[in-house]
């Protein structure tokens, strides 16, 4: 057991976060995301029973977001014909703002199938039990700087 590590982060997920380098991508996927088929060439971790917001909060305590690109955070854009609201995105904006001064300005919305394609080259996909639709979020890792 370690001190200061959010309890929601399993040893397996901590290992993956540690292995990742600058520019590597982590996907926190909702319960409907095809994690195993999209992630057949990357690491897929299971965090069933947990939602994306609490995992995002925990991950961002350890995981810096890339400052060398404008949009290190990507969300799956709502399909235009889908009459769905996405209040979870506001939750993400609040969490991101607590950990990075760029807040919602670093978010890019990506068309659904383009999101799947980008996720195929992620370092890891974390499959959650999140029930909110369009709750998938992609995070590009930044640098841990001296003094961090």
Image (spheres, rainbow, N blue to C red):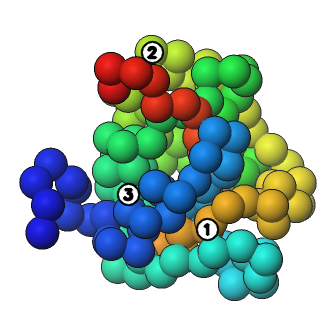
Task: State the quadrant of the N terminus.
Answer: bottom left
Say left or right for 69 vs 113. Answer: left
The answer to whether any part of residue 51 appears in the image is no
Mark 3 / mark 1, whichever is N-terminal = 3
Q: Which residue is mark 2?
A: 101
Q: Which residue is mark 3?
A: 55
**Residue found at the far front of this picture:** 146
Residue 115 percent location from the top left of the image: 80, 55
Mark 3 / mark 2, whichever is N-terminal = 3
Label ID, residue 125:
1
Location of residue 52 (image quadrant): bottom left
Location of residue 6 (image quadrant): bottom left
Q: Residue at point 89% right, 54% down?
A: 114
Tell which of 79 and 8 is nearer to you: 8
Tell which of 104 and 102 is nearer to you: 102
Q: Residue at point 41% right, 81% down?
A: 48
Residue 8 percent location from the top left of the image: 26, 65
Tell which of 142 and 29 is nearer to you: 142
Residue 35 percent location from the top left of the image: 67, 77
């Amino acid at each position: 057991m370690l001190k200061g590590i959010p309890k929601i982060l399993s040893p397996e997920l901590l290992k993956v976060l540690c292995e990742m380098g600058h520019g590597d991508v982590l996907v926190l996927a909702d319960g409907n995301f095809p994690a195993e088929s999209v992630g057949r060439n990357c690491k897929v971790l299971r965090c069933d029973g947990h939602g994306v917001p609490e995992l995002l909060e925990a991950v961002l305590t350890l995981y810096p977001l890339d400052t060398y690109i404008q949009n290190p955070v990507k969300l799956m854009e709502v399909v235009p014909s889908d009459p769905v609201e996405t209040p979870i995105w506001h939750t993400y904006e609040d969490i991101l703002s607590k950990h990075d001064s760029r807040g919602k300005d670093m978010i890019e919305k990506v068309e659904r199938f383009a999101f799947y394609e980008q996720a195929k080259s992620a370092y890891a996909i974390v499959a959650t039990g999140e029930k909110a639709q369009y709750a998938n979020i992609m995070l590009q890792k930044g640098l841990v700087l001296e003094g961090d």
